Every structure is written in structure tokens, then in C-alpha cells.
Image (spheres, helix red, strand yellow):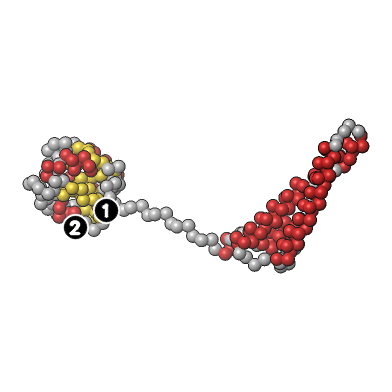
Amino acid sequence: MRTPTQAVEWANRVKAGYSGYCLQFVRSAFGVAAKHASAKDAWLATTRRHTDRTPPAGVPVWFSFDSGVNRNYWHVAISLGGGRIRTTSYPRSGVVGNTTITGLEKAWSGVGTTYLGWSEDINGVRVYTPAAPPPAPSAPSPEEDDMPTVGEIWSAEFGRGDRRITAGDLITQVDDILAEVADLRVEVGNITKIVASLDTSESRVKQLYDRRTSIDKIGPLLDRVDALADLVEKALTNNREV
């Protein structure tokens, strides 16, 4: 038996013949033995059918007829992928050519040609197996959970060791930072007054320079505020015992 790729390669090498013998053409492409008398019987015997109009390359593609001499025999072609097919008796009897599913329906619309679908099997033989979907990602086991505990975060940020952290500890940190912020606001106010009355006297310049240390405190203090905010956010997100 040929693979779907090999079946397409075989079908592409055939340029003529098989007029009235579409089932023989397609099963021969796969190297499958004869079993049914018509494409209609072969379609009705399939067990793995699909009705979408985008069959993969290398599968049987089936059509029915509402009228005409072949209304009781129907038709089968082989998919080339992307909605294209290779079929007998196209574009005329005795020729094997390429078209699309829709193109064949339109070309043979006079006999009520209708696309039925495609199948993974023909004459009782499975000729195509869809690729297995990728496995769903598994949840990490407890051993793989490397998220630090709130206590570990607290120890790293504030150096309080491994003892149990309470809500009071958090409140104390907030109060301490707010007190430092208030002090710095006073200092910034004083610096603003000095700048407003600044002159070129050496004493004023030195006084402003001495106040520089208060400004230097602002950056580290903001870092502490950010660290505390992150700690509270992680505690709420992880919902872990602190």
C-alpha cells in the first residue's frame, strides 16, 4: 500500500485512461485491492468520513450525481490538498486532470454533482491517519513550584528572618515609610524656599549643598515603597500563609 504522498505522486503520473473507472483509478493510487462495484458503494462503506471542503493531500474525495447515466455510480477523486483534486474524465472523457472541488461541481453541474466529503479509508483499508494533536500542557507538580513564599520574600526584602509575618508587621512598615515621607516633604519645602531666595553668597550655596542629603534619600525610599507594594501584591495573588 502507498502512503498519501506516494498516492498523489502515482496519480500525477497518470495522464489518461480510466474513463468510467474512477474508483479503480483512486484505489490503484493507494495500492488497494478491488472490493466494490461503484464509487457509491465504496462511499457508503467508508467508516471514517469528513464533510469539510479542505481535505488533506492524499485522501479519497467523493461526489454524488442527481441525474445522468452515472447517478447510481457516483464519483471519487484524489485530493491534492488546498481544495484541489486529481480526477478522471476531466476536463474531458479519457483524460486525467486537476481541478478543484468547486470546479468539478460547476463543470458537472448538468448532472447535479454534489460534494459529499472525504474519507480516511477506501475499500475497507485505512489510507490516511490524521496527526495526533499535541498533548495539553500538564500542571506543575508541587516539587516543580518554585514560587517563593511570602516569608521568603519578606526576609529578602526586609531582613526579618524566617519567623511568621503578621499583618502588624506590614502596617508597621507602612507607618515607618509614611513618617519618612512626611519628613522628606518638610525638607523639600525648606529646599524650595532656599532656591527661591538663592543668591551668590557662599553661605547660601553651602546651605543648599548640605540639604542635598535629603534629596538623596528619596530614591531609596521609593524603592522601599515599591518593594512593600510588590510583597503585598504577591501575598494576595498567591493566597499563601505568611
Q: Position of residue 124 (x, y in %)?
A: 21, 57
Kind of residue at badge 2: Ala
Q: State which quadrant residue 87 falls in.
A: top left
Q: Is residue 216 above or below residue 234?
A: above
Identify the secondary structure beneath mark 1. Answer: strand
**Most foreground residue, 235 or 204:** 204
Residue assigned mark 2: 45
Q: Residue furthest left?
A: 69
Q: Is residue 214 visible?
A: no
Q: Position of residue 208 (x, y in %)?
A: 86, 39
Q: State which quadrant residue 158 falls in.
A: bottom right
Q: Residue at x 22, y 48 (%)?
A: 61
Q: Residue at x 76, y 50 (%)?
A: 221
Q: Bin the neighbour count of mark 2 within 10 Å (Cα to Cα): few under 14, some 14-19, many 20 and up.
A: some
The tally of labels here is 2
**Most foreground residue, 80 or 15:** 80
Residue assigned mark 1: 50
Q: Bin the neighbour count of mark 1 within 10 Å (Cα to Cα): few under 14, some 14-19, many 20 and up.
A: some
Q: Position of residue 92 (x, y in %)?
A: 13, 36
Q: Residue at x 49, y 60 (%)?
A: 138
- In the rendered structure, find residue 74 and report the number of the disc placed on it: none
- Discs 2/1, front: 1
Residue 134 horizontal side relative to residue 60, left or right: right
Q: State which quadrant residue 150 falls in.
A: bottom right
Instruction: Pick whichever of labels 2 and 1 is earlier in the sequence.
Output: 2
**Most foreground residue, 69 or 184:** 184
Kind of residue at badge 1: His
Q: Position of residue 112 (x, y in %)?
A: 14, 46
Q: Is residue 74 above or below residue 98?
A: below
For the C terminus, give its image quadrant: bottom right
